[in-house]
């Protein structure tokens, strides 16, 4: 093997190494790009799941609050009706008491 053959071998090795390096850089960039896409997808999915869970929680809280409000409203109406009935029953007694005060 002569000097020219050795130099040619070195040149070919350098070319091959350069091509291998470029290929490795390209694969590294592609791997990084794919990782970023996957991370963005994971974050998007997590946000969507979080929003769905939050909406479900809020809906449940609204439903519970609505049931409680209806219950309180019903109790309030019952109490108001009891007060009104009590007032009607005592109205005649109050009238008699006031009128008896004029008789004296």
Image: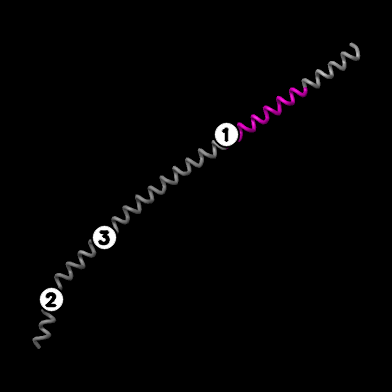
In the image, which residues are magenta? Answer: 17-39
Q: Residue furthest left?
A: 103
Q: Residue furthest right?
A: 3
Residue density around tag 3, few if under 14, some if 14–19, many if 20 or more, within 10 Å: few
Viewer-nearest of labels 3 and 1? 1
Expressed as whole percent of the image width and height from the top left, the position of residue 69 reads: 31, 56
Expressed as whole percent of the image width and height from the top left, the position of residue 35 reads: 61, 33
Q: Residue at x 83, y 19 (%)?
A: 11
- Give the structural element (helix, strand or loop) at label 2: helix
Write down the quadrant of residue 72 in the picture: bottom left
- Give the structural element (helix, strand or loop) at label 3: helix
Q: Which mark is residue 38?
A: 1
- In the picture provided, is 46 more to the left or to the right than 68? right
- In the picture provided, is 5 more to the left or to the right than 82? right
Mark 3 and mark 2 lie on one chain; the one further toward the N terminus is 3
Q: Residue at x 68, y 30 (%)?
A: 28
Q: Residue furthest top?
A: 1
Chief secondary structure of the magenta portion:
helix
Mark 3 and mark 1 lie on one chain; the one further toward the N terminus is 1
Give the residue number, with chain letter if any, for mark 2.
Answer: 93
Image quarter where the N terminus lies is top right
Give the residue number, with chain letter if any, for mark 3.
Answer: 75
Is 31 located above or below residue 92 in the figure?
A: above
Q: Nearer the viewer, residue 34 or 46?
A: 34
Distance (Cα) linking label 1 and label 2: 82 Å
Distance (Cα) linking label 3 and label 2: 28 Å
Q: Residue furthest bottom?
A: 104
Expressed as whole percent of the image width and height from the top left, the position of residue 88 reads: 15, 70
């Amino acid at each position: 093997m002569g000097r020219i053959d050795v130099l040619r071998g070195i040149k070919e090795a350098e070319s091959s190494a350069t091509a291998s390096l470029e290929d490795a850089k390209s694969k590294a960039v592609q791997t990084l790009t794919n990782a970023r896409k996957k991370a963005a997808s994971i974050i998007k999915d997590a946000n969507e799941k979080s929003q769905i869970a939050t909406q479900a929680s809020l809906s449940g809280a609204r439903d519970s609050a609505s049931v409680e409000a209806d219950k309180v409203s019903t109790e309030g109406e019952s109490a108001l009706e009891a007060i009104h009935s009590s007032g009607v029953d005592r109205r005649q007694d109050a009238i008699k008491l006031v009128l008896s005060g004029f008789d004296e």
